[in-house]
Image: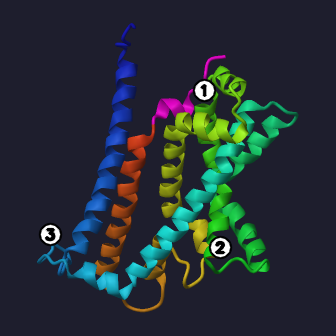
Amino acid sequence: MVKDTRLSSKLWAAANWTLIGFFILNLAAMIATVVTSSFATRWLGTWLPAGWTTRWYSAAWSEFQLSDVLSVTFQIVFLVVFLSGLLGVPAAYALARRDFPGKKLVMLLFLLPLLVPPITFGIPLATVLYKAGLAGGMSGVVLANLVPTVPFVILVMIPFIEQIDTKIEAAARVFGANTFKLFVHVLLPLLMPGILAALLLVLVRTIAMFELTFLTAGPTSQTLVVALYYAVFAAGVRAVQSIDAMAVIYMITTLIWLVIALRFVNPTQIVARAKK
């Protein structure tokens, strides 16, 4: 490969790296500010706080009832993950292995909830769920979050399925495996890395999903991100440090699951297609 040594190329590369560095620096500064504030006793007009304490975390835990909020969050998240896998994996297999009229249109419809901002379809979706008596509780939040997560599982799983040689399935059929045995004993072990990747990414996505959860949640079905929003904007006076402590808890929760997800995700498997 011939390296481009033109001045214009060097300037363009330098501008790109400068922009990336500026973005990362600002992001790190914002996170550092929130983390520092969550441990500060008093922080007004100085580079560093006047003192340090951990009491804001216990205050946030009791004031915002974080034990209940986290319990609801993980119940909703794991229900969404389970149902997304249950619906998405078989649908992905059907789309990967079958050709039918209108297949491209179906794939486009699956892409829409991922490409369109959630608020655009979230409002009419919430209206339908409220009219059906499902919104305001955990079931409404789960159903709303399934709209983007099931297509996400399908799109992630299709490349994994296409990488499996159809001759393996044909051989299993020859030796007497029915559809259920074929899926459980042959396909499932081969697809497990893809399933883990898809479901872990769904988990992280659901924890971070604000719009759909906010529009369909009730007082007892708020996830951590929605509870954080109400802590910031609801009526009443609250210590900024306790809200920042709650934000840190949210960031750590999301980061832990994101790190676990990245442990199983292989980007080349997600974007690659098996050679025909």
To which residue does mark 3 refer?
Answer: 48
Q: Is residue 67 above or below residue 175?
A: below
Identify the image quadrant of residue 127. Answer: bottom right
User: Relative to the observer, which residue lies in front, 79 or 257?
Assistant: 79
Which residue was labeled with disc 2? 139
Tell me if residue 272 is in the magenta stretch: yes
Asked if residue 40 is positioned above or below residue 179 in the image, the reply reads: below
Q: Earlier in the sequence, mark 1 or mark 3?
A: 3
Residue projecting furthest to the top: 2
Residue name at image x 64 percent, y 28 percent = 162
Residue 222's spot in the image, x, y percent? 53, 77
Residue matched to label 1: 164
Q: Which residues are magenta?
A: 266-276
- Residue nearer the viewer, 20 or 60: 60
Whole-angstrom CA distance, mark 1 to mark 3, is 56 Å
Along the polypeptide, which appears first: circle 3 or circle 2?
3
Kind of residue at disc 3: Leu
Q: Secondary structure at mark 3?
A: loop
Determine the image quadrant of residue 56. bottom left
Q: Residue, x 74% and y 40% (percent of image)?
A: 107
